[in-house]
Amino acid sequence: MKRRGVLRLTTTAIFIALLIGIQAAAAPLGQPVAGSLVNLLLIVCVMICGPAAGLTAALLSPVFARVLGIGPLWALVPFIMAGNAVLVLVWHGVCRVKFINKHIARAAALVLAAACKFGVLYAGIVRVAVPLLLRLPAPQAAVISNMFALPQLFTALIGGALALAVLPMVQRIRKG
């Protein structure tokens, strides 16, 4: 029992380290690449390690990105944390529902989790943070609003699709 807890903690730490490394390495490639890879890792983490690990990675990822200087303003970090948390919790929750088969569950998780993350980020950042909290000049507000609009839906869908492709391989390797 104790060994299982250590293994789970170690695996979670590895996913967090991967998230930090991927964010740092992919940042110069832009939001479509970096965001998609972050979403991929968050989804694989929740599917391999469970909801506690997925939620931990989801909450820590934007903090580390900001500390590394690659994330957005500190005022936006809580909204990004919420979006990431919704992504992993919805994905996990939908995959636990008894569908006809796991492929249908994962496809449903892909669409629902991406849509929910997009909704949280759009409502929180575009509709609340930018107009009410940040008080930025119009051009800068428009740039931030555009970053947290449809591109977030696309990166969540791409990251989810990549996760669907990678998960079978990761699960086979994990089973040894």
Image (cartoon, rainbow, N blue to C red):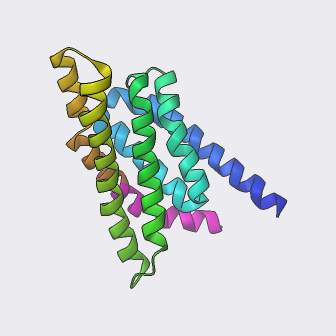
Q: Is residue 167 left or right of residue 155?
A: right
Residue 173 counted in the magenta span: yes
Residue 101 in the image: x percent, y percent? 41, 82
The correct choice, above or below, for 149 with respect to 43 in the image is above
Q: Is residue 174 magenta?
A: yes
User: x, y percentage for residue 59?
Assistant: 52, 41
Depth order, front residue of 173/84? 84
Q: Is residue 73 left or right of residue 155?
A: right
Judged from this view, the residue extending furthest toward the right is 2
Q: Pick the quarter of the image with the C terminus.
A: bottom right
Please name the residue shown 42% across and 52% down the image.
86
Q: On the image, which quarter does residue 111 sit in? A: bottom left
Query: Residue 67: x percent and y percent?
Result: 51, 22
Give the farthest residue toward the bottom: 100
Q: What's the magenta region?
A: 160-175
Residue at 83%, 59% (x, y): give it. 2
How many labels were placed on the picture?
A: 0
- In the drawing, does residue 16 fall left or right of residue 120? right
Q: Identify the residue at the far top of this view.
A: 137
Give how far across and how far down residue 56 sits, in percent. Answer: 58, 45
| Vertical arrangement, residue 164 with respect to residue 87, above or below | below
Judging depth in this view, the residue of 70 and 86 nearest the camera is 86
Can residue 144 be seen?
yes
- Chief secondary structure of the magenta span? helix
- Is the residue 97 above or below the residue 20 in the image? below
- Where's the N terminus, which quadrant? bottom right
Can see residue 70? no
The structure residue drawn at horizontal position 73% and vertical position 55%, both measured from the top left corner, is 7
Between residues 35 and 81, which one lies in front from this camera angle? Answer: 81
**Residue at left offset 31%, top offset 29%:** 129
8 displayed left or right of 121? right
